[in-house]
Amino acid sequence: MGDFETRANKQNLYEELYRAHHARIVQLCRLWLNDAHEAEDAAHEVFLKLFRATPAQESAVAWRAWLTRVALNTCRDRRRSGWWRWWRERSVEFTEVPLSSPEPTPEEQTVSREAREQIWQLFRGLSVRQQEVFALRYIAEWSVEEVAQMLEITPGSVKQHLFRAVHHLRKALGGQR
Amino acid sequence: MNRHLPDEVLWSLHEGGGTSAERTHVENCVACRTRFQRLEHDLKVLRQVLREAPPLAAPQPRRAWQIRWVPAVAVMALTLVLAWGQEWLRVLTLPVSPQEARKNQETVQFLTKEIPRALFSTNDLHPGKLPAHATSLAYLQAALDGGWPSEPCEPSDSTNCEPDIFSLLLEKQRH
C-alpha cells in the first residue's frame, strides 16, 4: 500500500512539474538549439530524465533549477554532437520560408516580420554563453545572481554577457526608431 | 552632470543598478530619458520575439570556402591516385637482376614441387587386408555388443583377426 502511495505521489509530482515547467523548458531549448522540433525532443528528454529521477527534492524552486540545469546540459550535449551540427547545417539549406498569413497576428503588427527574422538571426550569431545568459535572464526571468550560480560564473560576468547580447540584438530594431 | 549617459549605464539602471546621480540625470535629461525608454521598449520586443517559435531559416547560399574546398580536395585526391599509379607502374617495369631471377625460380620450384609432395605423400600408409563384407547378422550382433562387425578369420590369417563369436558359442555347445 505504501509503495502504491509513493508511486501515486511521484506521478502527481511529475504531472504538476510538467504542467508548471514544460512550456518554459521548450522555450529555453528553442533558444539554445534554434529549432522548434529539436527543442520539443530535448524537452521530452528532460522530462524523461525527471520521470526517472528519484524525487528527492520536494520544493518547487529546487525542481525549477534542476529542470533548467538538465535542459541546459541536454542542449549543450546536442549542440556538441557532430551529427547535430551536420544535420543543422544541411537542414538550413533545404528549409523553406513559410508563406506569411494574410492577417497579421497582434505580435506581427507591433514587430515586422523582417525585424523578427533579423532578431533571430542576430540571436543565432551570439556566442553560446551569451545565448545561455540571455535566455536565463530574460526568458526564464532569473535574477543575475541565479544565472551566475547556474552557469558557475560571477554576476559581473553575467552582466557583461547580457549587455553585449542586448547591444548586439538591438541592432535588429534600429530601423524601427 | 553635463554629459549624456552611455548605453551600458542605461542598461545598468534598467537592471536595477546605477547610482542615484545617474538615476536623477535620466529623470532630468530628455535625451537620456528617451534613450532609456527606447531600451526598455527594445528589451520588451526582444523578449516577446524570442519567446515565440523561431521562423524557419531561409535558404542560404553556400559560403565561399564551402564551394572552394570541394574541387581542391578532388584535385588533391586525383593527384594522389595518379602518383600512386605511376609508382606502381615503375615498380612493375623495373628490370630484374640475374641473381634475383634465379632466386625467384628456386622459390617457384620449391612451391610447385616440394610442398605438394610433402603434403600428399603416401609413404606412411600400410594398407592391410581389408575385412570381407560383413553379413547382416554380424552387424546385428555388433550393434548388440556395442562394437564393430567382424567376419570369421581365415585359417591362414594372423592373430590380429577377431574370432567369430557364433562359432565360439557353437563350439561351446558341442563340448
Image: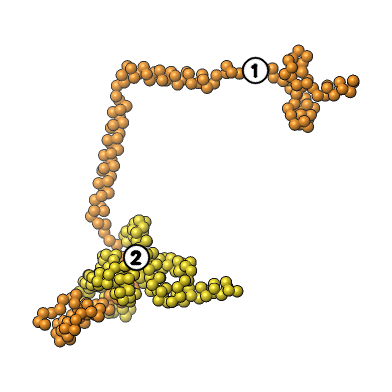
- As measured in the structure, the alpha-carbon distance from the residue carrying label 2 to the one carrying label 1 is 83 Å
What chain is tagged by disc 1? B
Numbered circles on residues, count: 2
Q: Nearer the viewer, mark 2 or mark 1?
A: 1
**Which residue is pictured at 38% across the width and 64% down the height?**
A74
**Which residue is pictured at 26% across the width and 59% down the height?**
B61
Crowding at mark 2 (Cα within 10 Å: few <14, some 14-19, many 20+): many
Mark 2: amino acid: Leu
Q: Quadrant of residue A103?
A: bottom left
Q: Position of residue A60 (x, y in %)?
A: 42, 77
**Which residue is pictured at 52% across the width and 22% down the height?**
B119
Q: Quadrant where the C terminus of chain A lies?
A: bottom left
Q: Is residue B133 visible?
A: yes
Mark 1: amino acid: Pro
| Colour mapping used in the image | by chain
The answer to whether mark 2 and mark 1 are in CB contact below 8 A is no
Q: Quadrant where the N terminus of chain A lies?
A: bottom right
Q: Position of residue A48 (x, y in %)?
A: 46, 67
Chain identifier of the yellow chain: A
On the rendered structure, is B40 left or right of A48? left
On the rendered structure, is B110 left or right of A139? right
Q: Nearer the viewer, residue B83 or A72?
A: A72
Task: Please determine whether, in this image, residue B8 is positioned above or below residue A90.
Answer: below
Chain identifier of the orange chain: B
Q: Position of residue A18 (x, y in %)?
A: 45, 74
Q: Nearer the viewer, residue B104 or B22?
A: B22
**Residue that carries the numbered disc 2 in the rendered image:** A33
Judged from this view, the residue extending furthest toward the top is B156
Judged from this view, the residue extending furthest toward the left is B2
Q: Position of residue A72 (x, y in %)?
A: 36, 67
Judged from this view, the residue extending furthest toward the bottom is B28
**Residue that carries the numbered disc 1 in the rendered image:** B127
